Amino acid sequence: MHVRSGGIVATIDAGLKRMVREAGGSVLSLANDRVVLEPDKI
């Protein structure tokens, strides 16, 4: 996966989340009716 300047992705796919993080992007999640920006390292 190639990401030029990061980016933000909302997904429930754990593999895609990992790929996005490794490429320097961020992941959004929905939790308790809120949008949450997940931490870079888990």
Image (spheres, rainbow, N blue to C red):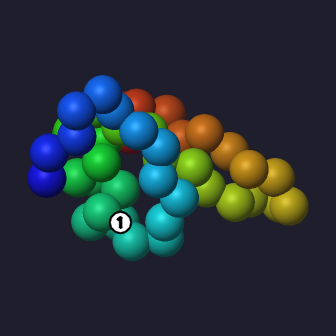
The residue shown at (49%, 34%) is 39
Q: Residue at x 61, y 55 (%)?
A: 29
What residue occupies the far top of the structure in this picture?
A: 5
Residue under the image location 74 percent in, 50 percent down: 35
Q: Note whether 32 is above or below 27 in the view shown.
A: below
7 versus 15 height, above or below: above
Closer to the camera in the image, 3 or 28? 3
Q: Quadrant of residue 31?
A: bottom right
Horizontally, residue 6 falls left or right of residue 11, namely left
Give the left or right position of residue 27, taking residue 35 as reference: left
Q: Residue furthest front?
A: 4
In the displayed image of the protein, which residue is found farthest to the right?
A: 33
Q: Label 1 sits on what residue type?
A: Ala
Q: Nearer the viewer, residue 5 or 27?
A: 5
Please identify the quadrant where the C terminus is shown: top left
Single out the residue that lies furthest toward the left. Answer: 1
Q: Which quadrant would residue 3 be assigned to in this image? A: top left
> Percent x, y for residue 2?
14, 45
The answer to whether 1 is drawn above or below residue 23 in the figure is below
The picture places residue 6, in percent across and down from the top left corner, at 34, 32
Q: How many marks?
A: 1
- Image height check: is 41 above or below 34? above
Residue drawn at x 30%, y 48% is 20
The picture places residue 18, in percent across and down from the top left corner, at 27, 52
Q: To which residue does mark 1 refer? A: 14
Question: x%, y% of residue 28?
Answer: 57, 49
* Neighbours of disc 1 within 10 Å: few (<14), some (14-19), many (20+): few
- Asked if residue 5 lies left or right of residue 31, the reply is left
Local secondary structure at mark 1: helix
